[in-house]
Image: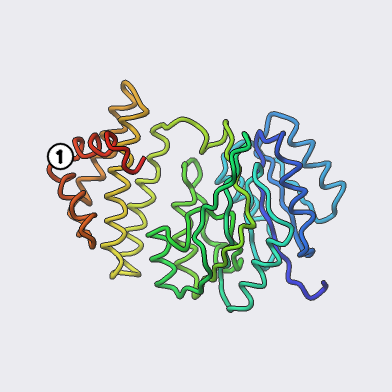
Amino acid sequence: MENQPLISVIVPVYKVEPYMDRCVRSIVNQTYRNLEIILVDDGSPDNCPAMCDAWAEKDSRVKVIHKENGGLSDARNAGLAAAAGEYIGFLDSDDWVSPDMYRLLYENLTEHDSDISACGVEMVWEDGTPPRLLTKRGCCVLDREEAMRAVIEESWLKQPVWYKLYKRELIQEIPFPVGKYHEDVFWTYQAVGNARKVSVFDMPCYHYTQRSGSIMGEGYSIKRLDSLEAKMLRIQYVQERYPSMVVDAKCDLCFFCIWSEQKVLRCMQGAEKQLALAKIHQVWWQIRDAEPRSLKERVWLTLARISFHGTAHLRNLFHIGV
C-alpha cells in the first residue's frame, strides 16, 4: 500500500444532497487506498456543506474546500489547484464508481506506460430503467494521433473527464472554462493533446446518473450552444498540431451544427429560439465547406448547403440524429 502513488479525486458539490453520500462512499471504499478526496462545496445552499465536513471527520483522506458558487468549472479548478496527487481523477457528485475503479485505472495506465487511462461508463436512471453502456466495447492503447482522432470522432474516447485517470503534469496547466456549459468539450482535446499514449478498457466502472435538475437533465437552451465555441477552438488547435485531422474536426462541427438546429427547432420558442438559430448559422457559414469522407456524410452536407434549415426539418421529420 505504501508504494502506491497518491491519486487526488476532485468532486464538485452543489445541490446533490440525495446523492452525495452514495458518491463519497464509493470513493472511500475503493480498493486503491492511497487517495486524496477533495470535496469542493461550490456554495451549495442545502445540507451538502455540512455533509462534506462530516465526511472529512470520518476519513482523514477527505479534504473540503468551501467556496462561493462559481459553477462546475470553477469548482474543478479550485480542486485541481489544491490537489497534491501524482495522478488526478474527477467525479461528479451525483454519480458513483465501482470499488475497483481507481485501482484498475492505475494498473491500466502503468501497464501500458500511458498518460491517461479510461474505463467503461454505464448510464443509470433513477426510475429503474435498465442501465446502458455508453462507451465502446473492447480495449485499446492509442498513440497521440489515434487518441485525438478518437476524441474528434467520439469513438474510443468520449468528452467527459470523470471516467479517466490523468497524470497531474499533463493537465495542471489546463483550466476548465468558467461559466461555460459542456466544459469538458473545451478541456478534453487539450488534455489528450498533451498525452503520448492513452489506454482504454471497457469494464463499466463509472456509473453516470440521469436525473432531473442536473445540467444534462435540463431542457434544451441556448447555453447548450457553448459546444459550438469549444469545437471551433478545437479546429484551431488541430490546425496547429494535427493538420491531417482538420477535415474530420470541421466535418464533426458541421454535423453538430445540423444537430443543434434540429434541437432548437424541436425545443425552443420565441426570441431565444431566433437568437440560437442566428448563433448556429454564424458558425455554419464558417465551416460549411468541410469535405466529408463518406457518401452518407456527403449527401447530408450537400443537402445542408442547399438548405440548412430545410435539412434540419427533414432530419427531424424522419427522427434522424435526435
Which amino acid type corresponds to the residue marked 1 in the rendered image?
Ser
Image location of residue 94, percent across then percent down: 65, 41
* Left-right relation of 74 to 281: right
Q: What residue sits 59% from the left and 62% below the top?
A: 119
Q: Which type of secondary structure does the marked residue at label 1 adopt?
A: loop
Image location of residue 130, percent across then percent down: 59, 43
Q: How is the image coloured?
A: rainbow
Q: What residue sits 24% from the left and 34% below the top?
A: 313
Q: What residue sits 54% from the left and 71% below the top?
A: 199
Residue indicated by mark 1: 307
Q: What residue sits 79% from the left and 54% below the top?
A: 28
Corner quadrant of residue 311: top left
* Left-right relation of 298 to 177: left
| Number of residue marks | 1
Residue at the extreme right: 58
Nearest the viewer among 35 and 303 is: 303
Residue at the extreme top: 270
Image location of residue 131, percent across then percent down: 59, 46
